[in-house]
């Protein structure tokens, strides 16, 4: 084994490295004076730039958190590298050949990240080569039918994973990689007979970090006999953390930094379509919801310019509406203005380009609407405004959105607009908005609590750091909340016993407590991985950090039923009770409507009677499961 890197080589690597170029791959830098550049610190959340780089000295320092160092320490902190790995990475950038002292050995600091990066690069090249094979004809046709020719695939490094169980593993073993490294990399899975290819019979897209290094893959199934999910991604590894990577950012970062504008789409082919159509600031998340870690990444690339733009695209279905509301709940973490673009007929950018051409994709992002306006309309659209009950429910759902507007000057105008949309008195709507603002400031555990003016101050705290941590002890002691708590406890602890069908129904149940509602949504976002290894970790990752302690407590707290043989039945029953509560509420509303009609022979009354019969049937089926 090679020994320690010679100190003279270390100094030479530091001398040759342009620190501004290195930092600029992660942070948008501006001139900050003579031989000084500044930007948002990549090591802590802040509102104004306090991170300074001195290229001639090869040194950086943050006046906010005190972090400082040179090119080597910067790479160590940013990419979680050992000292040796950071030096080797920098040398590779410079094509500088390092020499090692004899008689010394490297310390074993865990997985060799440099080899994991190299394995991913080798895998990427292997998949690209396989896309040209005879077996990959179906994959090539799939891509061509969606408007992606050979040049487009080459630009994005699209490849094909063969159907066999060990095509990639054998290829990498021949290059000197051992089974342990292949498992650590996420390129292979471990079974009773050893490691085998994670991706088989799929189109694969390389997921790269901001420096362009491949850290993982996303793969789409092609064949009907593939029983796996439609999209399969690399699991969490020492070099791949899905909540901190954005597909296409390596290609988009310059356009984002220059134009102060980013477009967040929903899939790999959407990113390809946008870039090929001329919208080069497009990125996508990788198998997870857009969250605060993604915001931190984009803020560092884009800077903290209040005139900058973040444009989201969402599907017009229920899942897209939930994604929009989730994005709005984190909107205050951006200094930039946030918007939503929805294509005609609900087409995503890939289909829009295929059916209407490149210009239609570019036009899509010029017809954007403010994110809060989109969220407001989506919240109202769920209710029947022709009834008093519907208008009151719509006001309750939409008032918090107005109360949380980042630009306070817009609040009076949108309050009047909301009153017009709902057909309600302005004074009533104003009281609801004021009440929502006060409630969200004082209610513990609310995931959408607005930020208090000046909360950042000199300490420049993030919104997440200001939220109180939700725990079981912080939950209200009411029968309704206890039912919600016990049902969620059963969903987490007994998910396999409950079964996928009942779980899918359970995540749609109304949950009144704000903190438990976050837990419900995290479970719902993780349903695709139900029953797989790492499902609980997936649930944890889908929830904001202040709510993860509550999820841990729900996972480990003793359940009211302590007899193992009765746990499955108890779990299904308590979840059924939660769903039954929704059905009873709906039944009460229908009965009230029928009473208002008065005449049992009225067609509207007969329709309600049919709905009531269907509700009773649904309640009976819940108990029969």
Image (spheres, rainbow, N blue to C red):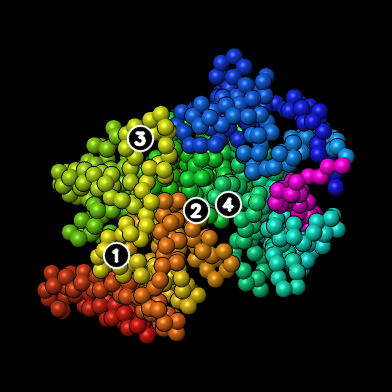
**What is the CA distance from the residue labelled 4 to the residue labelled 1?**
33 Å
Instruction: Report the span colored magenta.
Output: 103-131
Q: Residue furthest front?
A: 103
Do the residues bearing badges 3 and 1 touch, measured as CB atoms within 8 Å? Answer: no
* Dot 4 or dot 2, earlier in sequence: 4
Q: At x 69% / y 33%, what residue is drawn?
A: 72
* Dot 2 or dot 3, earlier in sequence: 2
**What is the CA distance from the residue labelled 2 to the residue labelled 3?**
27 Å
* Dot 3 or dot 1, earlier in sequence: 3
* Quarter of the image where one finds residue 610: bottom left
**What is the CA distance from the residue labelled 4 to the residue labelled 2?**
10 Å
Q: Secondary structure at mark 2?
A: loop
Q: Nearer the viewer, residue 137 or 413?
A: 413
Q: Secondary structure at mark 3?
A: loop
The disc label shown at residue 481, or none: 1
Which residue is denoted by mark 2 in the rendering? 289
Answer above or below: position of 389 versus 463. Answer: below
* Dot 3 or dot 4, earlier in sequence: 4
Q: Nearer the viewer, mark 2 or mark 1?
A: 1
Q: Nearer the viewer, residue 545 or 227?
A: 545
Which residue is denoted by mark 3 in the rendering? 455
Query: Is residue 590 something that shows in the picture?
Result: no
């Amino acid at each position: 084994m090679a020994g320690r890197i010679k100190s003279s080589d270390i100094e030479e690597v530091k001398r040759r490295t342009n620190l501004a170029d290195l930092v600029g791959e992660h942070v948008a830098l501006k001139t900050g004076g003579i031989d000084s550049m500044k930007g948002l610190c990549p090591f802590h959340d802040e509102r104004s730039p306090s991170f300074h780089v001195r290229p001639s000295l090869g040194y950086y320092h943050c006046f906010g958190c005190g972090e400082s160092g040179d090119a080597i320490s910067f790479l160590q902190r940013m990419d979680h590298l050992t000292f040796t790995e950071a030096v080797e990475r920098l040398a590779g950038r410079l094509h500088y050949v390092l020499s090692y002292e004899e008689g010394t050995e490297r310390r074993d600091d865990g997985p060799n990240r440099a080899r994991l990066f190299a394995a991913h690069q080798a895998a990427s090249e292997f998949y690209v080569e396989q896309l040209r094979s005879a077996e990959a004809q179906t994959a090539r046709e799939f891509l061509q039918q969606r408007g992606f020719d050979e040049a487009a695939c080459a630009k994005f490094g699209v490849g094909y994973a063969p159907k066999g169980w060990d095509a990639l593993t054998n290829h990498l073993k021949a290059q000197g990689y051992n089974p342990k490294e292949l498992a650590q990399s996420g390129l292979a899975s471990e079974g009773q007979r050893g490691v085998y290819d994670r991706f088989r019979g799929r189109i694969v897209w390389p997921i790269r970090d901001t420096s362009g290094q491949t850290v993982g893959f996303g793969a789409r199934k092609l064949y009907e006999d593939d029983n796996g999910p439609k999209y399969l991604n690399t699991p969490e590894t020492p070099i791949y953390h899905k909540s901190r990577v954005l597909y296409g950012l390596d290609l988009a970062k310059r356009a984002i930094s220059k134009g102060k504008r980013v477009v967040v789409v929903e899939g790999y082919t959407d990113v390809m379509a946008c870039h090929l159509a001329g919208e080069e600031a497009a990125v996508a998340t990788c198998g997870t919801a857009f969250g605060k870690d993604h915001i931190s990444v984009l803020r560092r690339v884009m800077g903290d310019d209040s005139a900058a733009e973040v444009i989201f695209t969402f599907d017009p279905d229920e899942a897209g509406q939930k994604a929009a509301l989730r994005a709005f709940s984190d909107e205050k973490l951006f200094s930039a203005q946030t918007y939503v673009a929805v294509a005609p007929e609900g087409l995503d950018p890939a289909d829009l380009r295929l059916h209407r051409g490149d210009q239609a994709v570019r036009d899509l992002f010029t017809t954007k609407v403010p994110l809060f306006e989109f969220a407001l309309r989506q919240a109202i659209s769920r209710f029947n405004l022709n009834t008093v009950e519907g208008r009151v429910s719509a006001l309750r759902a939409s008032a918090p959105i107005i109360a949380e507007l980042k630009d306070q000057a817009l609040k009076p105008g949108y309050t009047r607009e909301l009153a017009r949309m709902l057909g309600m008195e302005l004074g009533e709507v104003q009281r609801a908005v004021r009440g929502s603002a006060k409630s969200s400031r004082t209610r513990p555990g609310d995931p959408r609590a607005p930020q208090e003016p000046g909360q950042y101050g000199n300490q420049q705290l993030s919104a997440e750091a200001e939220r109180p941590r939700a725990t079981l002890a912080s939950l209200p002691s009411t029968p309704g909340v206890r039912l919600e708590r016990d049902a969620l406890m059963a969903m987490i602890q007994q998910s396999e016993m409950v079964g996928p069908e009942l779980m899918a129904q359970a995540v749609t149940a109304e949950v009144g407590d704000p903190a438990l509602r976050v837990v419900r949504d995290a479970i719902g976002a993780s349903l695709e991985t139900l029953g797989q290894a790492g499902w609980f970790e997936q649930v944890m990752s889908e929830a904001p950090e202040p709510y993860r302690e509550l999820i841990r407590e729900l996972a480990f707290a003793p359940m009211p039923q302590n007899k193992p043989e009765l746990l499955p039945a108890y779990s299904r029953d308590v979840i059924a009770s939660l769903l039954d509560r929704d059905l009873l509420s709906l039944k009460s509303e229908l009965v009230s409507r029928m009473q208002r009609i008065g005449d049992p022979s009225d067609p509207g009354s007969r329709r309600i009677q049919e709905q009531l019969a269907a509700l009773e049937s649904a309640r009976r089926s819940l108990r029969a499961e």
